[in-house]
Image: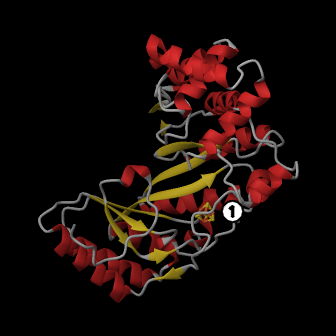
Amino acid sequence: MQQLHFQQGPIRPPSEADSLLIRTTQGCPWNKCSFCTLFDDMEFSIRPVEDINRDIWAAKAFYKDRKFTRCFLQDGDSFAMETTDLLEVLQTLKQTFPELEQISSYGRAQTMTKKTPQEMKAICDAGLNMLYCGMESGSIDVLKKMKKGITPKSILKSAEYAKQAGMKMMTFIIMGLGGKELSESHVTGTAELLNQINPEEIRVLTLAVKAGTDLDDMVQQGAFTPLTEKEMVEEQRKLISLLDGISSQYGNYHSINLLMELSGRLPVAKHNLLSTLDRFLSMDSDEQNNFILGRRIHYYTRLQDMENRLYFDTVQQQLSKIGNTNPTAIEEVFYHLRQRMI
Ligand code: SF4
């Protein structure tokens, strides 16, 4: 296999699987969120422009005639770069890969709001026209408890900056991030903020508590009570019912989510999204457990996959092995299966 002569970071959004990946920063400038271990052993640094430009040319040589229409700038926050440096990198990218239509990056609200509106516009005009925002929640209490280091106000301000500059914005939210204690605040705060931002896309993730995180400690100490799978579905139902006046694409694309069919453009898709959630919620608990286990052990992707009798019976056998009459034991199995998916 041909060897890469340019750096690749450890993460990219799932939708950037076929994109050109260019690394502008290493790690995350914050690196303190209670639930995250992504860059645990990596100190944040901004790569020198010469190194990034050298990587862009090395990528061109490596991919030869391959055409890329999308590029994702890794790792955690390209907006941490000096604006002039970022503009230089974008210029090199456009020269080297002139067919690029979209250049995207993660951007932290705290970093972006340090740029002036003029700088943001210049960055967008130079090609960085798509922003991934790890908002996770719109509740100040949840953001504080998770040590996100951002507030709903700063998220809204950065979203306004990005939009005024002409950037599309994709926001990630995490179902279950408030636990039982802050579920209500999580849902209402998140819906309220999303209604204010009206992002191009809302991407849903489902919480899985990673071993060794601060959040894991909170769970052990009783300060955070994880929602059950069913409660997370109920939470998502409430969230969608509160989304109002926005035209975002709403999607459950990550395999950690239970109901992968929950996807569509608002407001038209709202009715279908709620119907799918109601379909799951109206099943009896045996069927719900069958579906959850079937999803977690990869027999099902969608609710209709339960109609496959062979799959249904196989999952049912697995369920009876873990004792399908003991709800706590089953929920614990689901919790650990979810943990293994991250
Ligand atoms: S900002 Fe993102 S990458 Fe950084 S610690 Fe928080 S969740 Fe992890």
Q: Position of residue 112 (x, y in %)?
A: 55, 70
For the point 63% across and 19% down, which residue is it? 288
Is residue 88 positioned above or below 268 on the image? below
Nearest the eye: 38 or 32: 38
Q: Residue furthest left?
A: 65
Q: How many marks?
A: 1
Quarter of the rendering containing residue 50:
bottom left
Q: In this figure, which residue is indicated by the disc labeled 1?
A: 33
Q: Position of residue 243 (x, y in %)?
A: 61, 34
Respond yes or no on whether mark 1 lies under 8 Å from ligand 1. yes
Q: Quadrant of residue 20?
A: bottom left
Q: Residue at x 62, y 63 (%)?
A: 37
At horizontal 78% and vertical 59% (from top left) the residue drawn is 144
Q: Measured along the vertical axis of the image, is residue 10 above or below residue 190?
A: below
Q: Name which residue type carries label 1.
A: Cys
Q: Secondary structure at mark 1?
A: loop
- Measured as percent of width and height from the top left, residue 14 is found at 42, 50
